[in-house]
Amino acid sequence: MKQINTTISQKSITLLVWDDVIALCKISRAEIYRRIKKKTFPAPIKLSPRKNVWPEFVIEKWLQDVVKKAKL
């Protein structure tokens, strides 16, 4: 009988809080809220009613997309 490897590699995921996202994106909290509403910015993950976080790789991808669209 052939065994299938079901091991999942565990990779560390860094979660960013509001201050981190604002510092990385250089836009205000209000502007982030507007863009989330328009679906032009990734929505946060709610860890609790008062705690929003974003995986770092999601914000990095969003920033890369913004730079690509800027046609530098």
Image (spheres, rainbow, N blue to C red):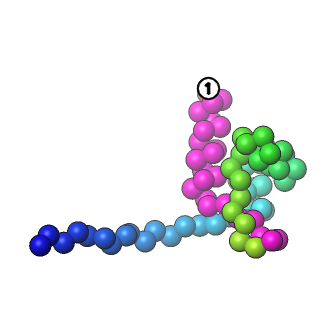
Tell me where the magenta segment starts and ends, as one range: 49-70
Looking at this rendering, what residue extends furthest in the top direction?
71
Provide residue 43's location: percent of width, then percent of height. Answer: 71, 53
For residue 27, side relative to residue 66 (left or right): right
For residue 31, side relative to residue 40 (left or right): right
Task: Tell me the residue that label 1 is attached to.
Answer: 71
The reply to whether the magenta stretch includes residue 67 is yes
Give the residue drawn at x 77%, y 62%.
Answer: 18
For residue 8, side relative to residue 28 (left or right): left
Q: Is residue 28 visible?
A: no
Q: In the rendered structure, which amino acid carries the disc numbered 1?
A: Lys
Quarter of the figure with residue 15: bottom right
Who is closer to the viewer here, 71 or 12? Answer: 12
Q: Is residue 47 visible?
A: yes
Who is closer to the viewer here, 52 or 23? Answer: 52
Provide residue 47's location: percent of width, then percent of height. Answer: 71, 71
Q: Residues within 10 Å of mark 1 (few under 14, many from 20)?
A: few
Quarter of the figure with residue 63: top right
Provide residue 33's location: percent of width, then percent of height. Answer: 83, 50
Give the residue drawn at x 77%, y 55%.
Answer: 22
Looking at this rendering, what residue extends furthest in the left direction?
1
Which quarter of the figure is the C terminus placed in? Answer: top right
Quarter of the figure with residue 38: top right
**Mark 1 element type:** loop
Q: Main secondary structure of the magenta part?
A: helix
The reply to whether the magenta stretch includes residue 12 is no
Provide residue 1's location: percent of width, then percent of height. Answer: 11, 73
Question: Total label count?
Answer: 1
Judge whether 70 appears above or below 35 on screen. Answer: above
